[in-house]
Amino acid sequence: MTGSVALDVVIGLVFIYLLYSLFATIIMEMISNWIGLRARNLKHSINRMLVDDQYKSQTAFWSLKIPAYFLGIYITIKDYFGVVGKSSEEKKLFFDFYNQPSIKYLSNGGLFSKPSYLTASNFSKALLDSLKNDQVGNNPLTKIQNGINALPSSSDTKAHIQSLLNDANNDLDKFKVLIENWYEDTQERSIGWFKRNNQIWLLIIGLVMAVSFDASTLKMANKLAYDKDAREQMVQLASSYLEKVQATDTSGKDELKSDSARLAFYEKQKKEIQGEIEQAQSVLGFGNTQFMWPCCKCFWTALCEDFWGYFITALAISLGAPFWFDLLNKLVKLRGSVQQPARTTSGTAKDTGLDKEILDVKA
């Protein structure tokens, strides 16, 4: 296999991985919206902020590494599904926070009645209102201080909020800024938790997709290596796709902060990606256009027949669409540069033996 053929095979595989990664990500996002995963993740992170660590009251056995790992999973599941693991007094601040009108009415109600997104200013206002709730005082700062004093005496949360007030020198505006910084720092870590959980789900979804669509890496690589027409068409599809994506206006995506807006957006994207996948499958000459669900016997038969081919595809999908998009962009640019005719020392063009076709890709 020459260098040009090998590069084209890699471009074809990366393009397929990109399409399936996008499809898997869209499915993951739709599932997240349907069952309120983002809202649960936000609720879990706020619970971590406003309720003391639930590990510290456990016995020495639960402080060991492996037991602590499983205890953490158990506690996370309880938090996600709203099971109260601490006394009502210890979680009073958390409950008061979510009962504030500025938080309660941000969600669309229904089964998952918690917001999936909060700004730092939303958080600071709701927290300060929670601290002032039912407190007496001549001014807001006195009410806040009384609210902090009313928290359980051994509470780490109480100590942290008091330290923020002390750092602000009892200046209410500075106190709000410090609370907002605390929230933003926590959300940065929370996004990391969410992405790690999503990557596990992407691997599972990727394996189901790989078998359902008959997307075995081994079969696809073999097809691209020995079928020149399929290889060239796949490179053309990859090039055209990059041009189309780079010409698309994505400025509106930042406005997709509500669950309903995100769901409508991903429904539209799902149909577009399905079209791209069907086009790529027609070039390869094999693959299913409809899901073959795991409840079917044929699913498990296909998985056993080519497990490693499907598993490699699933691993690739779990890396995520941004990774494959960046790699595909670099590979197509590389292909365009290496296919420029080389110059001899006399200034005439020298045939390098490579395909003369140059992809017109926007930088």
Image (spheres, helix red, strand yellow):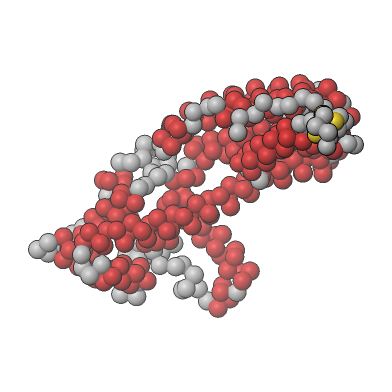
The residue most toward the front is 346
Left or right: where 235 falls relative to 344: left
Q: Quadrant of residue 151?
A: bottom left
- Pick the quarter of the image with the N terminus: top right
Residue in view at x 12 percent, y 61 percent: 139
> How far across and how far down the image is residue 83, in percent?
45, 55
The residue most toward the left is 138
Q: Quadrant of residue 18?
A: top right
The residue most toward the bottom is 60
Residue in view at x 49 percent, y 70 percent: 55
Residue in view at x 60 percent, y 33 percent: 363
> How far across and how far down the image is residue 353, in percent?
87, 31
Asked if 297 appears above or below 150 in the picture, the reply is above
Left or right: where 136 falls relative to 96: left
Left or right: where 206 falls relative to 352: left
Q: Quadrant of residue 337?
A: top right
- Pick whichever, 313 or 39, lies toward us: 313
Image mark count? 0
Residue in view at x 16 percent, y 66 percent: 142
Asked if 224 appears above or below 90 in the picture, the reply is above
> How far across and how far down the image is residue 131, in percent?
24, 61
> How far across and how far down the image is residue 10, in percent?
78, 37
| Residue 290 seen in the current view | no
| Residue 164 seen in the current view | yes
Asked if 355 appears above or below 21 in the picture, the reply is above
